[in-house]
Amino acid sequence: IGCDSLLTGSDSLVSGGTFTDMNALTAAISNCGIGGPVIVRMLPGKYSEMLFNNAIPGTDSINTITFTSYHNNADSVIIESTTGNEATIKLSGGASYLIFDKLTVNGCMNSGASYSKGFDLAGCSDIVIRNCKINVLPNDNYYSDYSGISSIWQNGQFEDVWVENNEIRGAQYGIYLDPSTLSGPIYFRNNIIVSRYVGFCSYGNTILPDISYNTITFDTTSSRDAFYLLE
């Protein structure tokens, strides 16, 4: 994609907006970078996967990128995987300083899909996920492939992640953390999880300074633990 300027300020997405679809948006951000704080206000509708595989030029602790609903209503914006080959939002390769606020994020919801994840933290830092609704295709297999938010050892580590005031439903694991090397911290506060197996699972290598004021319930009788934590 050609770039005539860095992204700054507030931009809107889809019909009538600055960008016509998710691919155009992510390409512009990844290739052009930003020149200041950016807010992407997503107009009502349904969108495809959002994949960031590299560090975004210009991002830092002040120059962040916020993705949010144009009408401040998570129900009006749905981001959903159509293939099930990746998490709906995958952050890898050093993608950093991203904020996801007031969005609905669905894993692949196709009947029989073998993979359904909301977020995959696969090599990223300084990520905020707040006020979102994360839905995963219910499945009876006890696999991390059906997780609301996950980080698995094959895909690298994460640093400085805040997960606050979200709803996660349908997942075998609401949160599944099994990074390859020491990761974190991750702050997990004021979330609602309705899980099918484990609410919050960490297999170690993760700094967990604050896990507080969360509500975890189960929608099956085969549930295991609200929290499953290993050193």
Image: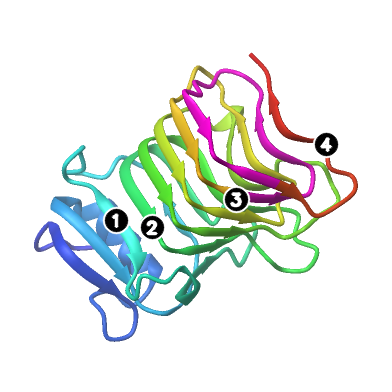
Determine the secondary structure under disc 1.
strand
Residue 106 located within the stretch drawn in magenta = no
Front disc: 1 or 2? 2
Magenta highlight on residue 205: yes
Front in this rendered view, residue 158 or 192: 192
What residue span does the magenta drawing correspond to? 193-216
Closest to the observer: 98 or 57? 98
Of the two numbered discs 1 and 4 in the rendering, the one whose residue sits closer to the viewer? 4
- Give residue 66's mark: 1
Asked if 53 appears above or below 39 in the picture, the reply is: above
Tell me residue 35's x, y (percent): 11, 51
> Seen in the image, is 176 located left or right of residue 209?
right
Badge 2 density bin: few <14, some 14–19, many ≥20, Cα 10 Å: many
Q: In the rendered structure, which disc, 1 or 4, sits on the residue that comes first in sequence? A: 1
Q: Position of residue 84 (x, y in %)?
A: 65, 58
The three-letter amino acid code for the residue at tag 1 is: Thr
Q: Residue 101 has which mark?
A: 2
Reading the image, the residue beneath label 4 is 224
Q: Compute the Cα span from label 4 to label 3.
A: 17 Å
